[in-house]
Image (cartoon, rainbow, N blue to C red):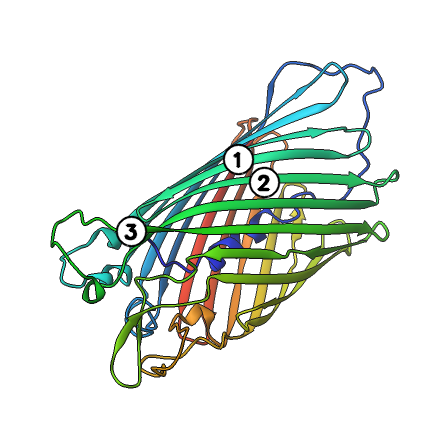
Amino acid sequence: MKKIYLHVLFMYLGILSTYGQSKNTPLRTDTTNYQSRKLKIDEVNLVSAYYNQNGNNSAVTGGIGTEKLTDIANTFDLQLSKFNKNGYKNTFLFELGVDHYTSASSDKIDPTTISSASSADTRIYPSLNWTHSNEETGNSFGFTGSYSTEFDYQSLGAAFNLTRQSADKNTQFDVKLQAFLDQWTVILPIELRTGNTGKKHEQYDTAPRNSFSSSFSISQVINKRLQVMLVVEPSYQHGLLATKYQRDYFTDGSLQAETLPDKRYKLPIALRVNYFATDQFIIRTFYRYYIDNWGIKAHTAELEIPVKINAFFSVSPFYRYNTQIGTKYFAPYGQHQVTDQYFTSDYDLSTLTSNFYGAGIKFTPPKGVLGWQRLTTVELRYGHYTRSTSLVSNIVSLNLKFK
């Protein structure tokens, strides 16, 4: 049931995983025409992240009150591969994520309890991807299935991915289509419930929330130093899009649960530019424009500059700036009009600016970390986030890569 600012967490983990390969290099072919057909382990990744935030604009209590929250996220992924008799590669990626959070704001859904079920929760989300690829051409396609469960929702997901490369490997086109079919538990603030039994395990209604998204990207190697990528990611949501345990207060002093349209269209358009200034110095830039039918418009710009200190140690400072025009349905505490059809006091949907900055250090010794050859990479990153609505958060993550 967590109301966590996941865009900060996902933004951070996105920075962690983006451009793991420093250069696009032509794929090497095996001149012996032999590939092992045994299933083998290619890579294992363990990522742990700790996130905490604080603020005074909780949507659970109508746009005021504590936003204190902590989250511990752990992800394990295992990548295996096998070549078939025709020389094509089949890659299997299994991922298991487990998040545990504590939330002071969610505990205010029913403030009469000492510690309600909403004050802490655990989310579990496994997924499995299969990709079929031709290493000579660089073309591939694959499918993903996923599941996620938490106290107040369950989600089933499916995805399709397609990659096509030009003959010279300098141009790449990627498509990804995703669908998530969610079932949310409709939990109202305690004072808005009817027929409250007072039992510890009260029964609630459920409602669907379905999300369909796509991603179309084209990347181009301009020359040996410059690479660019254009990404368009339209998406559509339908169902219960409001968080019903979030309160909204009106000018006459009345109270209702958050109410928002049951349809939402989103269109982010992004551009990435990577410039390899030297063998030790890279400039990575990112810009995204976002618009949706709720009236939100946003601009995001990011700069990351990885610096290779030596052959196996690098430092990567980064900075991201975001500015957003909020939805027309937003109003602060006590300022909604009684004639409003839709209303929210969730500051995620308000007009705001934010800054996110930090750095990462990456250690990839040729003989393995601490002499352990299987442990090829250790990466530690820290990020600090501030927002004009007074929200402040910190996140630190550790990535261990085994091969």
Give the residue drawn at x 83%, y 40%.
169
Q: Which of the marked residues, 3 or 2, is nearer the chain's N terminus?
A: 2
Which residue position holds label 3? Answer: 205
Q: Position of residue 293 (x, y in %)?
A: 56, 68
The residue lying furthest to the right in this view is 168
Label 1 – label 3 distance at C-alpha: 27 Å
Q: Position of residue 29 (x, y in %)?
A: 82, 25
**Helix, strand or loop for disc 1:** strand
Which numbered dot is residue 145? 1
Q: Is residue 243 left or right of residue 253?
A: right
Q: Is residue 268 visible?
A: yes
Q: Which of the marked residues, 1 or 3, is nearer the chain's N terminus?
A: 1
Q: Position of residue 188 (x, y in %)?
A: 26, 61
Mark 2 and mark 1 in contact (Cβ < 8 Å)?
A: yes
Q: Is residue 193 left or right of residue 126?
A: left
* Residue 132 picture quarter: top right
Give the residue drawn at x 13%, y 62%.
112
* Residue toward you, 310 or 303: 303
Give the residue type at disc 3: Asp
The quarter of the rendered structure image containing the C terminus is top right
**Helix, strand or loop for disc 3:** strand
The residue lying furthest to the bottom in this view is 252
Give the residue type at disc 2: Ala
Q: Position of residue 255 (x, y in %)?
A: 26, 75
Determine crowd level at label 3: few under 14, some 14-19, many 20+ residues with C-alpha closer than 10 A: few
Q: Which of the marked residues, 1 or 2, is nearer the chain's N terminus?
A: 1
Which residue position holds label 2? Answer: 159
Label 3 – label 2 distance at C-alpha: 28 Å
Mark 2 and mark 3 in contact (Cβ < 8 Å)?
A: no
Determine crowd level at label 2: few under 14, some 14-19, many 20+ residues with C-alpha closer than 10 A: some
